[in-house]
Image (cartoon, rainbow, N blue to C red):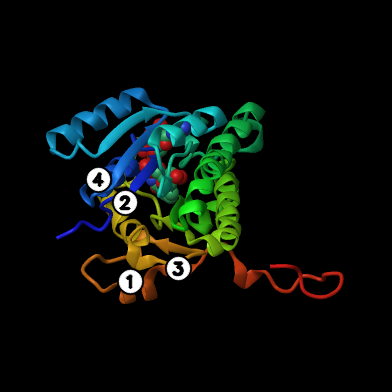
Amino acid sequence: MAQALEGRSALITGAAGGFGRVLTRAFAEAGAKVLAADVAADGLAQLSEELKSAGVDANVTTRVVDISDRTACNDAVAAAGKVDILINNGAMSMGVISPHHITDLVGIEDIDPDVWDKFIAVNLTGAWNLTRAAVPAMKAQKWGRIVNVTTSMFTMLRGRFHPYGPSKAAMEAMSAGHAQEFEPFGITVNVVVPGGPSDTPMVPAESGYDRAALIPTSAMPPPMLWLCSADAQGVTGNRYIAAEWDASKSVDANRAAAEAPAGWPSLAGTPVWPGGKPNE
Ligand SMILES: NC(=O)c1ccc[n+]([C@@H]2O[C@H](COP(=O)([O-])OP(=O)(O)OC[C@H]3O[C@@H](n4cnc5c(N)ncnc54)[C@H](O)[C@@H]3O)[C@@H](O)[C@H]2O)c1
């Protein structure tokens, strides 16, 4: 039987991280050719070893890419040959500021302005850089899948969880806009979030959380694989809570449980606009 992503080429960022590793493996196992990108060379080397031991390395190429570096993003897309599927999963975590950021929340004085800039450059502009580089070929072939990983609304709006929360809120807004913009070209843009704190290095041991109570990394691949398959053609502008997606249930049941529009259209109201309705 043909695999769901046979013949497709995927670029996955943050591939050396907790979610990135399982996503890389799942996409390779589904038949995609994966360019696994991360800024962490050691982590990528470890990932390669894992994939080799599991016998699924043939479909994966690793590449060191700092997604805040626009040239490096352009080069990565060129090196991939074609990118049918772009998974913007790589991100900086609050651990960069303090390993104790969960028990001892961070105030504005604790954030070096250069660190603020770097968060925006990686967590928001990194995804934009790769989208900008990958979209022309997707448009030309009238097929593309972009999945952006943001976070729960609680974290986006949480006090003393900056710059991570606002960087992810901006990414969510970008996703909603890109979904509208690229829809006429057969390119879908959706958001997938785990649904809460997850068992990855992004949640440090210092959090004190019971690791067994965290969302497992295995939660992310099922909704992502479906979104990137032919079956999800035309499904765009949504956000999915991975923890609500139960792989043993039907896609319809999972959509009913886990899907909502990306961003906050229900809060948008009607703007006061000169001449009536804004252009869409
Ligand atoms: N773990 C959670 O609780 C949680 C919750 C909600 C959302 N998320 C999101 O899930 C995604 C994956 O995170 P994770 O939990 O696997 O964390 P992680 O820290 O294990 O992985 C993040 C990866 O991104 C990479 N990265 C950081 N800066 C980069 C750069 N400049 N260029 C390229 N790669 C870079 C890191 O090296 C790391 O491998 C992130 O977008 C994160 O915001 C995580």
How far across and how far down the image is residue 144, in percent? 44, 55
Q: Secondary structure at mark 4?
A: helix
Decide: is 275 above or below 189: below
Mark 3 and mark 4: Cα distance apart in space: 23 Å
Which residue in the structure is indicated by mark 3? 234
* In this rendering, position of residue 248 left or right of residue 90: left
Which residue in the structure is indicated by mark 1? 254
The mark lying in front, picked from 1 and 2, is 1
Decide: is 128 above or below 16: below
Which residue in the structure is indicated by mark 2? 214
How far across and how far down the image is residue 243, in percent? 34, 61
Three-letter code, disc 3: Gly
Mark 2 and mark 4: Cα distance apart in space: 25 Å
Mark 1 and mark 2: Cα distance apart in space: 21 Å
Three-letter code, disc 1: Asn
- In the rendered structure, which disc, 2 or 4, sits on the residue that comes first in sequence? 4
- In the rendered structure, which disc, 1 or 3, sits on the residue that comes first in sequence? 3
Q: Secondary structure at mark 2?
A: loop
The reply to whether dot 4 and dot 1 touch (C-beta < 8 Å) is: no
Between residue 239 and residue 237, name the one nearer to us.
Answer: 237
The reply to whether dot 3 and dot 2 touch (C-beta < 8 Å) is: no
How far across and how far down the image is residue 170, in percent? 60, 50
Which residue in the structure is indicated by mark 4? 28
Between residue 163 and residue 66, name the one nearer to us.
Answer: 66
Residue in the picture at 55% in, 39% down: 129
- In the rendered structure, which disc, 1 or 2, sits on the residue that comes first in sequence? 2
Mark 3 and mark 2: Cα distance apart in space: 32 Å
Between residue 181 and residue 54, name the one nearer to us.
Answer: 181
Residue in the picture at 66% in, 29% down: 113
In which quadrant will I find the N terminus? bottom left
